Image (tube, grey):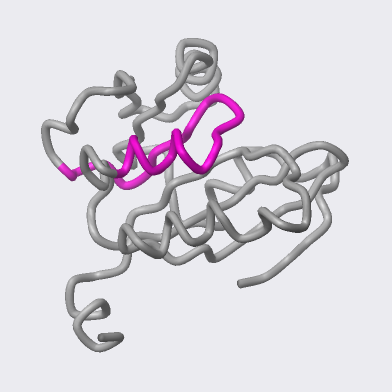
Amino acid sequence: MSQQTFHPTISLSQLLAEAGVRSASNIRVTGPGSLPALLWLCRRGYERVGCLQAGRRSPADDAEALLVAHTATGAWLADLLDRGPHVREGGVMIVQTAHAPAANDGVVEAVFRAHGFNVVRRLSGAHRNVLVARRAAAGDLREAA
């Protein structure tokens, strides 16, 4: 996992591109800020964007990316992932978290691992972290066991 200090010149578009998400990718957004995030993505040319209502089971794991549009806690993320991975194998989730006290470091990463995701990028800012987690392929999970 690469750790980088958040820099204001890193845009969400750049982060999505680095994660392999293109304008034609199937993208879902969830959380209280999902409508503004959906509009932002559509205005920047992302063609296949939709909302995933929090608390609902994903109808299919066909999305290539899920953007969580609020500051998520480990418990909220675990609840979301308990209802389904929401992205296909190899897909990514982008989540913003608050900086946690040292005793809680790694909680969100542990939630991701427990649900078959690997954190591949972490951007640290003054008050928030942005994590990019990729869903492992079923074969990758068997090899790790």
| 64 with respect to 67 (left or right) | left
Going 55% across and 36% down the picture, which residue do you hit?
73
Residue 90 percent location from the top left of the image = 31, 62
Q: Quadrant of the N terminus?
A: bottom right
Q: Quadrant of the C terminus?
A: bottom left
| Magenta extent | 61-81
Compared with 27, 143 (above or below) is below
Compared with 72, 129 (above or below) is below
| 1 with respect to 29 (left or right) | right
Residue 89 highlighted magenta (yes or no): no
Going 52% across and 20% down the picture, which residue do you hit?
37
Residue 74 highlighted magenta (yes or no): yes
Compared with 98, 45 (above or below) is above
Residue, far left = 59
* Frontmost residue, 12 versus 98: 98
Compared with 87, 1 (above or below) is below
**Quadrant housing residue 53:** top left
* Frontmost residue, 40 versus 100: 100
Q: Count the numbered circles shown.
A: 0
Going 52% across and 63% down the picture, which residue do you hit?
119
Residue 33 percent location from the top left of the image = 53, 15
Residue 66 percent location from the top left of the image = 39, 38
| 5 with respect to 16 (left or right) | right
Going 45% across and 18% down the picture, which residue do you hit?
38
* Frontmost residue, 6 versus 40: 6
Residue, far front = 103
**Quadrant housing residue 44:** top right
